[in-house]
Image (tube, rainbow, N blue to C red):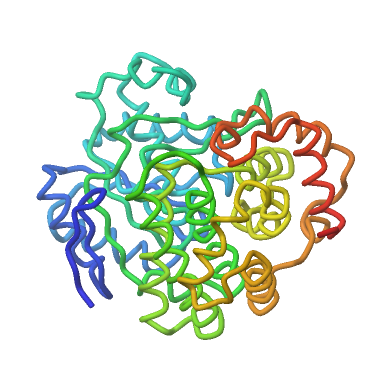
Amino acid sequence: MNSNWNYPTAVRVGAGRITELADVCHDLNIDSPLLVTDPGLASLPMVADIVAQCEKAGLKIGLFSDIKPNPTGSNVNDGIEVFCAGNHDGLIAFGGGSGLDAGKAIAVAANQSCSLWDLEDIGDNWLNADPDKIPPIIGVPTTSGTGSEVGRASVIVDEESHRKAIIFHPKMLPACVILDPELTLGLPAGLTAATGMDALSHSLEAYSSLVYHPMAEGIAVEGIRLVKEYLPTAVADGTNIEARTQMLVASAMGATAFQRGLGAMHALAHPLGAIYDAHHGMLNAILMPYVLKANYPAIKDRIPRLARYLDLDADFDAFLNWILSMREEIGIPHQLSAIIPEDSRLTEIGGMAVVDPSAGTNPILHDAAAYAEIARNAYHGTL
């Protein structure tokens, strides 16, 4: 099942295609790439094999892995020091959301006179960066969730304000992506479930958005179908190459679709993740049905059309019941209390959610009190 695509960037899909990484570097005129990944992956044989393959091909490859599951500005700045000290001319963002987001952020800020935070996705801040100084990026995901490998932004924690900031620049989009399902075979069932639900949240929120973007809407619909067809199989049998391939594709489709915008799931997941350092995909997975209910007045006529495409009864309740049933099947907790230690800061989180960039494209512009109420319902399991 090998394919070469060019939307939204060049994508190489298929088992074993990580062996083409050195060729991709040569094609992009990268002689000294920095491979950025997380500490867990850095210790695995797959990373050692990749480094050895690149060295054999004559590349002067470096490795940086000092990043948290929710990467911070300090992590990015440390990576910039390594990038500059090694005179690297390209970057391989490798891993789940943390490795991909941190790698892209390091690349965009490494050679600039402005700071990382000067590139936060507010107004035309991206113009603060000199595009000619941004090195080429290669995206290699090892999970099927964030889709950051086909995105132009990174989510980075600002430690001073305890919030997640979106760093944006068009040239953060990797010049080439390798979707190799063999890299995902070792992902545990729990992480397969959480990251897969993250992919679903991207497509579902993009579909629910009222922004006019028919191409993104169509991609979202098919991305949701792929999750429905293949996520339970990927969780139950992590060695299934077909399911792993289709979930990588669904993940990339979700991130492509959310050019149309995200919504309340992400508006809440961002502050919850920043404050409690909880897994982003799991937060979206738990929040999903509560946000769907809160958005019901605006999406009640749209969801039946989606349900029909998924071979469900064409009504909102059938779609919601499918979400609940699949979550139970793949082991997603029903309420936030399973992963969040207390609920004393939910009013504060509601205030943070309402100003999160994702809130602007939710089909209903909830106020802070409404966001806090959604979070409380999710915490206590009140659907």
Q: Is residue 209 left or right of residue 267?
A: left
In the figure, residue 289 lies in which quadrant?
Answer: bottom right
Residue 356 rendering spot, x and y as whole percentages: 61, 31
Residue at 39 percent across and 15 percent down: it is 114
Name above or below for residue 38 compared with residue 126. Answer: below
Residue 112 image position (x, y, % from top left):
33, 19
Camera-nearest residue between 228 and 334:
228
Q: Percent x, y for residue 215?
A: 32, 50
Q: Quadrant of residue 249?
A: bottom left
Q: Is residue 297 left or right of residue 215?
A: right
Decide: is 278 above or below 182. above
Identify the image quadrant of the N terminus: bottom left
Q: Position of residue 162 (x, y in %)?
A: 68, 30
Q: Where is 370 relative to 313, above or below?
A: above
| Image quarter in which the C terminus is found | bottom right
Q: Residue at x 58, y 44 (%)?
A: 70
Q: Is residue 78 left or right of residue 150?
A: right
Q: Quadrant of residue 130?
A: top left
